[in-house]
Image (tube, helix red, strand yellow):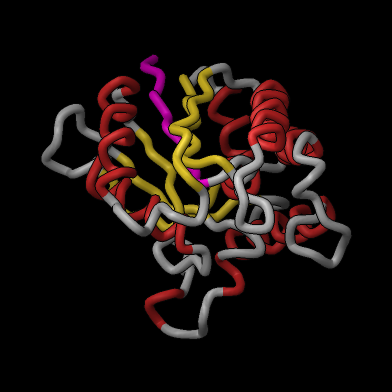
Amino acid sequence: MSRERVLVIAAHMDDEVLGVGATIARHVRSGDRVTVCIACHRAYDHQIDPLLVRQEQASAKQAARALGYQDLRFLGLHDERLDERLIDVIVPLEACVRKVRPTIVYTHHRGDSNQDHRAVYQATLIACRSLSKPKTRRLLAYEVPSSTDIAAPVPEAAFQPNFYVNVEASLPRKLAAMRCYRRELRPFPHPRSLKGLQILAAKRGMEIGFDAAEAFMLLRDEWA
């Protein structure tokens, strides 16, 4: 049985857990090789603090252990500036794609309220062109609570999932991974609270008939 090479592309440390955490754990349980590529350091109050960056990277590594994958990569780009020069995102991301040779890629949604998320989405489309080698056979966009859900009410920003993953068994790992990001956790009813994540998983599950699910927009599927 062939195993998939999975690449999760995230703008910030914690996006990978918020959007794909339980699905990552499910891939790991299935024996797939998972790589997470995080584009930028996180800014606080619009400033990059090297100490806070190191602390956040430590949190990301703890979250990776909670989810069970080993390959975590940091591109080290500047938070809040990814949309200034898209080529600065594309070049290192292309290098990552060439190295990992993913068959499945998860990336941000094009309509997110966060400009870095939108830039990562655009860069992913270029790095994972359908005619490029190696070929990514499945490309999906994920939602990030407190970003995807607060986008402007215009059609082009709508997150309309058409692909669901049953995460009933792996949701506890997602919650454990999110606990590693103590600085990013919020109390309920914030969407980035543990209870908020459980409620979203239950809502997405109801949409497809599961107890808990993560939802995606399928952008390309060459298995179809």
**Residue 66 location (% of width, % of height):** 72, 25
Evaluate whether residue 152 shows in this view.
yes
Residue pictured at 71% horizontal, 42% vertical: 168
**Residue 57 location (% of width, % of height):** 64, 30
The magenta stretch is 1-11
Indicate the quadrant containing the N terminus: top left, top right, bottom left or bottom right: top left
Residue 190 on the magenta span: no
Residue pictured at 70% horizontal, 32% vertical: 51
**Residue 212 location (% of width, % of height):** 70, 51
Residue pictured at 14% horizontal, 36% vertical: 132
Residue pictured at 75% horizontal, 49% vertical: 184
Of all residues, the one furthest to the right in this rendering is: 187
**Along the viewing direction, whichever of 221 and 42 lies nearer the viewer:** 42
**Along the viewing direction, whichever of 214 and 131 lies nearer the viewer:** 131
Number of callouts? 0
Q: Is residue 50 left or right of residue 71?
A: right
**Would you identify the image quadrant in which residue 206 lies?**
bottom right
**Residue 52 location (% of width, % of height):** 71, 37
Q: Is residue 208 left or right of residue 51?
A: left
Residue 3 on the magenta span: yes
**Along the viewing direction, whichever of 118 and 172 lies nearer the viewer:** 118
Residue 102 sits above or below residue 119 on the image = above
Residue 96 sits above or below residue 40 on the image = above
**Would you identify the image quadrant in which residue 193 lies?**
bottom right
Evaluate whether residue 224 shows in this view.
no
